[in-house]
Image (cartoon, helix red, strand yellow):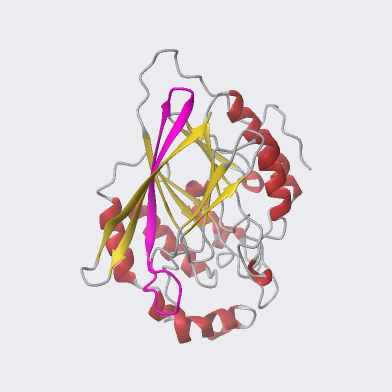
């Protein structure tokens, strides 16, 4: 298991001045928008695993994931004052280059790259693709505050106030009928380094990825293959919270760490009508601030109302977490 230590991998971060007033940092998470269209796809692009994804889109996904829901989402997000918006994967259906272009245009409408952070999902890495035609189009939205080499985009690190947003990529091409994800030993090793560096500076660490990490969260063919390794790193190095998508369901779990339990939140698809048993579209807004020797976390869910055609606040919860 990668050890939690403090090397020179992370950019140096200034500590808050003693006695300085600290305001709550607000951010939001959306996931699995599946925003692209396959209406004009060239059949020659489907002579691989993508054919199965296209048939799924024709039969079900094009009715479930709706553009009007995403338009309502964008309107609601514009009302929020956010330090960061996190997008936890599956922006496309089968990862075609034209889908990456559609997703980039959508991301630009959401905000500039400094305000919107993306990690890819399994649908974005449906098959092995040419980097320059696909993920390179999202590079600015995936990279850290201090950009590194392309092959080391992840873990990404963005710091906003006292919060460290640490993005992981579980998007790896897999054989047909599998929707699994994998982080890999190198990414887990770098994650341990980032967690150590940000803990040393007293930051609230938000780890976000596409696939779930808790045991039993997903079916075997949709699991994170090295979830046990990720849990071990987080248990050893600590994290204040974890966010993911993938399952198209809203869930709240708990991850034990040596520094105390960390909440694990999942949100449904941001574009879903809820036609096939999955949750209808929803996203979470979070607010974090210091509260004495603890952190105060407030979570407000916004859900799509099909009758009114807009997102409305659904419920709010508060947590007190160890520092």
Residue that sits furthest to the right in the current view: 1
Residue 265 picture location, percent across and down: 50, 52
Vertical relation: 279 (above or below) 284: below
Residue 307 picture location, percent across and down: 22, 72
- Magenta-tinted stretch: 271-298
Determine if the magenta segment contains residue 120: no
Front-most of 254 and 219?
Answer: 254
Residue that sits furthest to the left in the current view: 308
Residue at 70 percent of width and 37 percent of height: 236
Residue 118 picture location, percent across and down: 49, 51
Instruction: Determine whether, in the image, residue 286 is placed left or right of residue 252.
Output: left
Vertical relation: 27 (above or below) 12: below
Residue at 33 percent of width and 70 percent of height: 67
Residue 190 picture location, percent across and down: 69, 39
Question: Residue 134: which quarter of the image?
Answer: bottom right
Vertical relation: 190 (above or below) 36: above
Residue 243 showing in the rendered view: yes
Front-most of 136 and 202?
Answer: 202
Residue that sits furthest to the top in the current view: 18
Question: Residue 156: which quarter of the image?
Answer: top right
Quadrant that contains the N terminus: top right
Front-most of 130 and 214?
Answer: 214
Residue 42 showing in the rendered view: no
Question: Residue 262: which quarter of the image?
Answer: top right
Residue at 33 percent of width and 55 percent of height: 109
Instruction: Determine whether, in the image, residue 140 is placed left or right of residue 152.
Output: left
Residue at 46 percent of width and 61 percent of height: 250
């Amino acid at each position: 298991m990668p050890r939690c230590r403090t090397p020179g991998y992370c950019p140096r971060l200034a500590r808050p001045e003693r006695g300085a007033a600290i305001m709550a940092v607000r951010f939001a998470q959306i996931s699995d928008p599946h925003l692209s269209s396959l209406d004009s796809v060239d059949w020659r692009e489907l002579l691989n695993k993508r054919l199965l994804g296209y048939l799924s889109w024709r039969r079900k996904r094009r009715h479930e994931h709706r553009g009007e829901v995403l338009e309502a989402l964008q309107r609601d997000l514009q009302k929020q004052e956010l330090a960061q918006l996190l997008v936890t994967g599956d922006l496309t259906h089968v990862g075609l280059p034209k889908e990456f272009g559609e997703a980039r245009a959508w991301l630009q409408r959401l905000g500039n790259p400094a305000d919107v952070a993306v990690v890819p999902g399994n649908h974005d890495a449906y098959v092995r693709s040419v980097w320059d035609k696909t993920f390179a189009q999202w590079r600015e939205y995936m990279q850290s505050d201090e950009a590194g080499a392309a092959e080391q985009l992840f873990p990404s690190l963005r710091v906003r106030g006292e919060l460290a947003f640490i993005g992981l990529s579980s998007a790896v091409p897999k054989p047909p009928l599998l929707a699994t994800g994998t982080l890999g030993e190198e990414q887990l090793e770098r994650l341990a380094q980032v967690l150590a560096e940000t803990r040393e500076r007293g930051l609230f660490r938000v780890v976000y990825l596409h696939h779930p990490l808790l045991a039993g969260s997903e079916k075997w063919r949709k699991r994170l293959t090295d979830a046990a390794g990720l849990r071990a790193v987080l248990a050893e190095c600590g994290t204040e919270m974890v966010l993911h998508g993938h399952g198209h369901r809203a869930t709240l779990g708990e991850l034990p760490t040596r520094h105390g339990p960390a909440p694990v939140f999942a949100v449904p698809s941001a574009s879903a009508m809820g036609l096939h048993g999955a949750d209808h579209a929803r996203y979470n807004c979070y607010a974090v601030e210091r509260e004495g020797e603890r952190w105060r976390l407030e979570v407000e869910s916004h859900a799509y109302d099909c009758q009114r055609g807009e997102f409305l606040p659904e419920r709010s919860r508060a947590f007190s977490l160890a520092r």
